[in-house]
Image (cartoon, grey):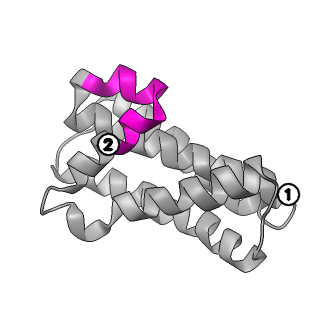
Amino acid sequence: MMELGFEVERIIEDAEYLAKKAIEEADVNIRDAAEKAWGAVVKATNVLILRFKPEVYERAVKVASVRRSVLLEICEDPKIAPLRLWERYGSRETYLHAQCFYEGVCEPVNSIKRRIVETMDYVKDIKEILTSF
């Protein structure tokens, strides 16, 4: 198993922390929990980009469309494709970030909560990729 570099490890730990906080908060303030979960997704995705495409990392962190296109490119790897990270990312971007947080439409609640909880799986899958490749 490959050892994570300090910066990579710090970022993935931040993502895990945000995902945990989102889950804890889902029944208290779903809108804030949705944005915390989205933050976890972004951090985990950014660290994946840092590991596989470091030359575009700075731009991907700042420009969402670059982050999406680089993630799609990474997800074309046959070892990563079965995890469906691209689809999972898009689902959270649409429902947690755009719809729930920005528009304030957090319905259906059970669907939003499920995506919040499943965000931890997204982060863990990326951590597994980081330690396996």
Amino acid type, label 1: Asn
Looking at the rendered structure, the secondary structure element under dot 1 is loop
Q: Amino acid at mark 2?
A: Ser
Label 2 or label 1, whichever lies nearer to me, is 2
Q: Position of residue 128 (x, y in %)?
A: 30, 56
Q: Residue at x 37, y 20 (%)?
A: 58
What is the number of the mark on residue 58? Answer: none
Residue 50 point in image, percent of width and height: 30, 31
Examine the rendering and report whether any part of residue 120 can be seen.
yes
User: Which of the 4 quarters of the picture holds residue 49?
Assistant: top left
**The image quarter in which residue 61 lies:** top left
Res. 33 in view:
no
Looking at the magenta stretch, what is its main secondary structure?
A: helix
Q: Nearer the viewer, residue 2 or 97?
A: 97
Residue at x-position 74% and y-position 57%: 100
Q: Which residue is mark 1?
A: 29
- Mark identifier at residue 69: 2
Q: Is 84 situated left or right of 40 in this image?
A: left
Image x and y of residue 122, in percent: 44, 60
122 to 130, vertically: above or below: below
Q: Residue furthest right?
A: 28
Q: Say whether residue 67 is magenta.
A: yes
Q: Is residue 115 left or right of residue 64?
A: right
Mark before the other along the chain sequence, 2 or 1? 1
Identify the residue at image location x=38%, y=29%: 60
Secondary element at image label 2: helix
Magenta region, residue range: 56-68
Sort mark 2 into few (<14), some (14-19) or many (20+) by Cα contacts within 10 Å: few
